[in-house]
Image (cartoon, rainbow, N blue to C red):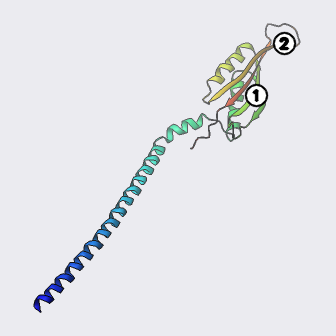
């Protein structure tokens, strides 16, 4: 009888150990899966931090780029720059049109003319090229104007320009 009870006790113990191992293995699989997911999330978090660091570290460079782009909001400032440039070179500025861009072409198109002496018009032309903005010259024409139809040594010159101000809607 003692052998039978020991046998039953051993059998119950083996069954309990088997159940414990089976349960433990299931828990280990769950823990391993949870650990893998945690590592994946940690990796995504590290990647996010890397992008955030990259954006933060490039802030100064991006600001320089944004300063060279003229947007619809900063268009009046650019026109003021053109007027100051015309005044400083002793020319007269006449803006014919300023057309804001659209979704297909975000560039702003400006058509304007400048009047002054030959040297002043050329000086304005060279200075507009050195403005700290990204622009594309689409068309330029130069013509001579006489005040009263007579040929005079100090005749006026006119330059007509059509430019596009590059506006690549970059993130700030």
**With respect to residue 105, does 24 lie above or below?**
below
94 sits left or right of 129 in the view = right
Say the numbered circle drawn on residue 150: none
**Quarter of the figure that contains the N terminus:** bottom left
Towards the viewer: 95 or 107: 107
Say the numbered circle drawn on residue 146: 2
The reply to whether callout 1 and callout 2 are in contact (CB within 8 Å) is no
Q: Secondary structure under badge 1?
A: strand
Mark 1 is surrounded, within 10 Å at the Cα level, by few (under 14), some (14 to 19) or many (20 or more) other residues, namely: some
Residue 130: name its quadrant: top right
Residue 12, given in percent of the width and then of the height, sits at: 21, 83
In primary-sequence order, the first of circles 1 and 2 is: 1
Tell me what residue is drawn at x 68 percent, y 37 percent: 106
**Quarter of the figure that contains the C terminus:** top right
Alpha-carbon distance for marks 1 and 2? Answer: 23 Å
Residue 122, given in percent of the width and then of the height, sits at: 69, 16
Residue 152: name its quadrant: top right
**With respect to residue 166, does 43 lie above or below?**
below
Mark 2 is surrounded, within 10 Å at the Cα level, by few (under 14), some (14 to 19) or many (20 or more) other residues, namely: few
Say the numbered circle drawn on residue 111: 1
Tell me what residue is drawn at x 64 percent, y 33 percent: 166
Towards the viewer: 72 or 120: 72
Towards the viewer: 4 or 166: 4
């Amino acid at each position: 009888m003692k052998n039978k009870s020991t046998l039953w006790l051993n059998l119950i113990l083996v069954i309990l150990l088997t159940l414990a191992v089976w349960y433990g293995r299931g828990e280990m699989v769950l823990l391993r899966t949870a650990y893998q997911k945690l590592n994946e999330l940690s990796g995504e978090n590290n990647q996010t931090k890397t992008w955030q660091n990259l954006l933060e570290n490039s802030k100064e460079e991006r600001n320089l780029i944004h300063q060279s782009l003229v947007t619809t909001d900063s268009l009046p400032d650019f026109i003021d720059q053109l007027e100051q440039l015309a005044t400083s070179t002793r020319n007269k500025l006449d803006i014919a049109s300023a057309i804001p861009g659209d979704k297909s072409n975000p560039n702003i198109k400006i058509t304007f003319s400048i009047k002054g002496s030959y040297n002043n018009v050329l000086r304005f032309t060279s200075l507009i090229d050195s403005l700290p903005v990204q622009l594309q010259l689409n068309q330029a024409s130069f013509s001579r104007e006489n005040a009263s139809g007579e040929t005079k040594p100090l005749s006026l010159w006119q330059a007509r320009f059509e430019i596009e101000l590059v506006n690549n809607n970059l993130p700030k």
